[in-house]
Image: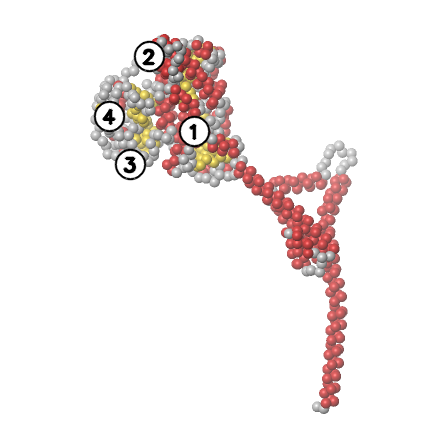
């Protein structure tokens, strides 16, 4: 090809190239304006949409006001709620009754703000819709991010979104703060649920709670401690403060308090009532009928628990007449302890046998020896007489007979043969502290004399008035000799006394052995007491007066004042007073002379004081001028014992009942001669000739009774001044 032709080809190619470039540039120039027009319209639409959404609530509110105005009747006298008020009410109900309404509303508001902000930013900036939504979220989450915005439109939108984000953050902070405060308030007031199993649940609050907790702590010590849950209609912090003030060691037991009512199933569920191994219902202080009525309603609530109850109920009642109704409602689940009647009968027993109350304290409390029931297959086929001497560390008292449906027989015949399934009731220090061994060689021997205790007429004084006075009178009438006198000294008028006794079911004309003598007066006024022949009474019972029994401190103060006044009057009237006065020089008596006079007066007559507060016990035990029955603590011990083992309630009911077996104190001269050397087992077998079980003794020179003594085969010298504690049939 020639050079000229090559030049022509190159020129043609250049022309074509120029044409292509021009056409491309024309296309680009033609398409760019169309694209810009479409983007601008889309951004304007987004901006208008965001403004419409922002103004929509205002339009809606104005519309609601207009509709309310249009619907309002001009001539109607009845007031109708406006639509906006109805809407506000619906919103309020929604926020109040739905648990997640507030956080859900906050979430919706946050999403709406992000959407509005994203659309507005898309309308005023050149960014994509995705970037605008993300940028809106950053403004909501952190209000400081809007500082980098440029231009009037972006800055206005970013400030608005950031301001909304601050409001949402403030509401979120308020919700979180309220939730935390509500949780802490719930914990402080005891509203949270107790997640426990096999715990002891106590329902109610009374003066007996401290002693009850102490006994449960002692009972659980061998297990390393337990869990006790207390629910009462009191503030949780107050309950915990009162429990912290109690002067005893909890020995590893934890006490959990909750505020609530035992009549409300939701509150019962809160303390895991269905998983408790025992439920103790305490009687309220105050009116007996109201307290028992509340206990009955509590039992009804407990029987209505849907999950059912794993443990048994121990219900403290104030009046024996209400026991049948509570057992009818509760059925086999319920064990009852009628505190008032039990203490009344115990006081009568103590008046006849001083020192018995302290023995009951040892047996009912978990600190020393108590009742236990256990099966021993190796004893099957043995006579009860042989079982008696088979336990070196325990004293058998009865048999739980399997063939009689598990009935407990106290003090059975020596000829009873243990059958398969029978269990042995013993008094021992702990559940794992005793076991049967090989039978020792024990001589039975003979009794020195027969048990003939002739009844003599007695004169007894009651100071104060109790609700169960008619029951105490009937018990005394059964025990005392014909012609005995019962003096009743209190502030209740004679006519009112007769009415109360008659209403209680006592027919005074049917009393066979005692004569009632009524005297009206105040037991804390000396001149009123001086009108009584105090030096002539064999026994004086100072009762916790019904008018002040709801206050333990006040009742004990009255009992102490009455005791000191009676002992002082007795000391001045007894014949040894003149001999003592002659020993005192010029009135310079020794510091303890008044106490010595009262202690000598106590040798002439027995005074039994009913004490409600355990702290009062120390005053009486140190002065030694009166025996006492610590009623509240004894009832607490009984409740704790039945809570740990419900079978023991049958034993306690028989020992406190009018018929059957009871605890008695016998003189050693009924079993041995002066200076005779015997082992405890030999004394035990001698007592079996009278159908008695010896469970302990008190030596003549000792102050404390020893229950379930060790070294039962050891030979020792006895004195006829010693006394033995036995379980025997009531005389």
| Residue located 74% across and 81% down the image | 14
- Residue at screen point 22% across, 31% down: 440
Q: Which one is earlier in the sequence, the residue at label 1 or at label 4?
A: 1
Q: From the image, tell me which residue sits under label 2.
A: 456
Q: Position of residue 436 (x, y in %)?
A: 27, 34
**Residue 211 got which mark?**
1
**Residue found 27% across the figure and 32% down from its top:** 392
**Whether residue 720 is situated above or below residue 681 in the rendered picture:** above
Q: Which disc number belongs to residue 625?
A: none
Name the residue beneath numbered marker 4. Answer: 716
Between the C-alphas of marks 1 and 2, the distance is 39 Å
Classify mark 1: helix, strand or loop.
helix
Nearer the observer: mark 3 or 4; the answer is 4
Measuring from the top left, give residue 299's x and y in whole percent: 47, 30
Determine the secondary structure under disc 2: loop
Q: Quadrant of residue 343?
A: top left
Q: Nearer the viewer, mark 4 or mark 2?
A: 4
- Spatial CA span between label 2 and label 3: 48 Å
Tell me which corner region of the image, top left, top right, bottom left or bottom right, holds residue 699: top left
In-image side of 495 versus 666 (left or right): right
First of labels 2, 3 by sequence position:
3
Q: Is residue 15 left or right of residue 553?
A: right
Contact between marks 1 and 4 (CB within 8 A): the answer is no
Rendered view: 533 above or below 200: above
Q: Which mark is residue 377?
A: 3
In space, the residues marked 4 and 2 are separated at their CA atoms by: 34 Å
Taking the image as shown, residue 585 lies to the left or right of residue 413, namely right
């Amino acid at each position: 090809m020639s050079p000229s032709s090559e030049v022509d080809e190159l020129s043609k190619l250049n022309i074509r190239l120029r044409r292509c470039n021009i056409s491309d540039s024309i296309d680009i120039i033609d398409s760019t304006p169309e694209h810009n027009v479409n983007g601008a319209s889309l951004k304007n639409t987004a901006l208008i949409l965001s403004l419409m959404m922002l103004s929509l609530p205002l339009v809606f509110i104005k519309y609601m006001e207009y509709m309310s105005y249009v619907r309002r009747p001009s001539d109607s006298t009845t007031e109708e709620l406006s639509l906006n008020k109805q809407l506000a009410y619906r919103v309020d109900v929604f926020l109040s009754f739905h648990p997640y309404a507030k956080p859900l509303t906050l979430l919706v508001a946050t999403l709406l703000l992000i959407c509005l902000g994203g659309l507005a930013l898309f309308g005023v900036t050149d960014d994509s819709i995705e970037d605008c939504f993300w940028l809106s979220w950053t403004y909501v989450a952190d209000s400081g991010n809007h500082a980098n915005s440029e231009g009037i439109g972006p800055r206005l939108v970013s400030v608005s979104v950031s301001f909304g984000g601050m409001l949402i953050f403030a509401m979120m902070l308020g919700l979180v703060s309220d939730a935390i405060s509500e949780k802490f308030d719930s914990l402080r007031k005891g509203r949270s649920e107790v997640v426990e199993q096999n715990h002891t649940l106590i329902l109610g609050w009374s003066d007996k709670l401290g002693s009850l907790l102490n006994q449960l702590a002692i009972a659980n010590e061998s297990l390393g401690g337990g869990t006790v849950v207390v629910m009462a209609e009191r503030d949780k912090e107050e309950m915990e403060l009162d429990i912290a003030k109690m002067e005893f060691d909890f020995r590893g037991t934890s006490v959990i308090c909750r505020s609530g009512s035992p009549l409300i199933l939701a509150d019962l569920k809160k303390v895991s009532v269905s998983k408790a191994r025992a439920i103790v219902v305490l009687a309220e202080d105050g009116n007996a009928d109201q307290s028992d009525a509340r206990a009955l309603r509590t039992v009804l609530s407990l029987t209505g628990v849907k999950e059912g109850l794993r443990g048994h109920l121990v219900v403290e009642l104030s009046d024996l007449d209400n026991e049948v109704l509570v057992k009818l409602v509760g059925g086999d689940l319920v064990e009852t302890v009628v505190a008032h009647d039990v203490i009344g009968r115990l006081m009568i027993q103590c008046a006849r046998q001083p020192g018995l109350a302290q023995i009951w304290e040892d047996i009912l409390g978990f600190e020393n020896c108590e009742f236990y029931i256990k099966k021993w297959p190796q004893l099957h086929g043995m006579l009860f007489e042989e079982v008696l001497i088979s336990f070196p560390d325990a004293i058998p008292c009865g048999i739980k007979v399997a063939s009689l449906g598990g009935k407990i027989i106290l003090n059975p015949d020596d000829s009873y043969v243990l059958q398969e399934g029978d269990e042995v009731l013993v008094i021992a220090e702990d559940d794992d502290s005793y076991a049967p061994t090989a039978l020792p060689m024990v001589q039975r021997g003979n009794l020195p004399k027969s048990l003939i205790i002739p009844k003599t007429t007695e004169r007894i004084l009651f100071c104060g008035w109790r609700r169960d006075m008619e029951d105490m009178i009937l018990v005394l009438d059964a025990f005392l000799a014909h012609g005995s006198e019962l003096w009743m000294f209190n502030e209740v008028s004679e006519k009112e006394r007769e009415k109360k006794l008659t209403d209680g079911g006592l027919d005074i004309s049917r009393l066979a052995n005692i004569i009632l003598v009524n005297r009206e007066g105040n037991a804390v006024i000396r001149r009123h007491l001086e009108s009584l022949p105090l030096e002539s009474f064999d026994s004086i019972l100072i009762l916790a007066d019904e008018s002040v029994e709801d206050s333990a401190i006040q009742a004990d103060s009255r009992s102490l004042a009455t005791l000191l006044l009676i002992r002082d009057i007795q000391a001045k009237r007894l014949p040894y007073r003149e001999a003592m006065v002659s020993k005192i020089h010029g009135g310079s008596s020794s510091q303890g002379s008044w106490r010595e006079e009262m202690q000598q007066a106590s040798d002439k007559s027995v005074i039994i004081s009913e004490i409600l507060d355990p702290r009062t016990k120390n005053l009486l035990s140190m002065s030694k001028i009166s025996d006492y029955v610590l009623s509240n603590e004894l009832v607490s011990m009984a409740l704790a014992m039945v809570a740990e083992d419900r079978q023991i309630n049958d034993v306690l009911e028989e020992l406190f009942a009018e018929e059957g077996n009871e605890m008695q104190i016998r003189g050693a001269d009924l079993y041995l001669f002066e200076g005779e050397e015997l082992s405890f087992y030999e004394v035990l077998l001698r007592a079996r000739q009278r159908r008695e079980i010896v469970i302990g003794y008190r030596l003549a020179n000792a102050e404390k009774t020893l229950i379930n003594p060790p070294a039962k085969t050891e030979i020792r010298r006895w004195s006829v001044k010693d006394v033995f504690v036995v379980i025997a049939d009531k005389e």
